[in-house]
Image (cartoon, rainbow, N blue to C red):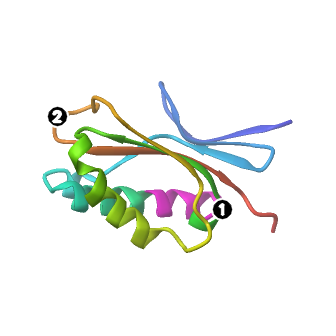
């Protein structure tokens, strides 16, 4: 039962894989999008999820669960519009969305996902 850790730092790894399941660390908008609105930040954040999934050999069609954290509850409709366009039809994961303080003032949204690594 080997555990693989990717890009491990002092407090976290960007991804941890165990028995074919990947647990991604929280993803937020990239630095270039952090001054943007919820739509801009959600698009950037999901793009970063795509990149990390690709890096570990998975994709958005293999998501098992997603937890979204919003700074402002009033942003849920705009965030969902981006999410709905991003999520392939028929592949929606189990999902939760909560309001929570963000790690830095400019951030509006964060996501944590779990995904399967499909067999090669």
Q: Secondary structure at mark 2?
A: loop
Of residues 105 and 101, the one nearer the viewer is 101
State the quadrant of the N terminus. Answer: top right
- Does residue 91 lie above or below 7 as drawn? below
Disc with the residue nearer the chain's start (2 vs 1): 1
Q: Which mark is residue 105?
A: 2
Q: Is residue 56 magenta-colored?
A: yes
Residue 3, image x, y percentages: 75, 37
Left or right position of 78 against 93: left
* Number of the label disc, if any, that sits on residue 62: 1
Q: Residue shown at 49%/68% (left/top)?
A: 87
Q: CA distance from mark 2 to mark 1?
A: 32 Å
The residues colored magenta run: 49-59
Residue at horizontal 21%, vertical 46%? 74
Using residue 31 as the reference point, say whether residue 91 is left or right of it. Answer: right
Q: Residue at x 81, y 64 (%)?
A: 119
Question: Is 28 or 76 nearer to us in this picture?
Answer: 76
In percent of width and height, residue 45 lies at 36, 55
Residue at position x 15%, y 56% in the image: 36
Name of the residue lying farthest toward the right: 1
For the image shown, how many numbered marks are present on the structure?
2
């Amino acid at each position: 039962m080997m555990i693989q850790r990717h890009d491990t730092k002092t407090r976290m790894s960007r991804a941890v894989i165990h028995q074919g399941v990947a647990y991604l660390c929280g993803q937020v908008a990239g630095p270039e999008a952090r001054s943007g609105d919820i739509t801009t930040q959600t698009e950037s954040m999901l793009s970063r999820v795509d990149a990390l999934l690709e890096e570990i050999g998975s994709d958005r069609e293999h998501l098992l669960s997603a937890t979204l954290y919003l700074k402002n509850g009033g942003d849920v409709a705009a965030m969902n519009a981006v999410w709905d366009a991003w999520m392939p039809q028929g592949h929606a994961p189990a999902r939760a969305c909560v309001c929570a303080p963000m790690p830095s003032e400019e951030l509006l949204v964060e996501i944590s996902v779990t995904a399967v690594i499909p067999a090669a």
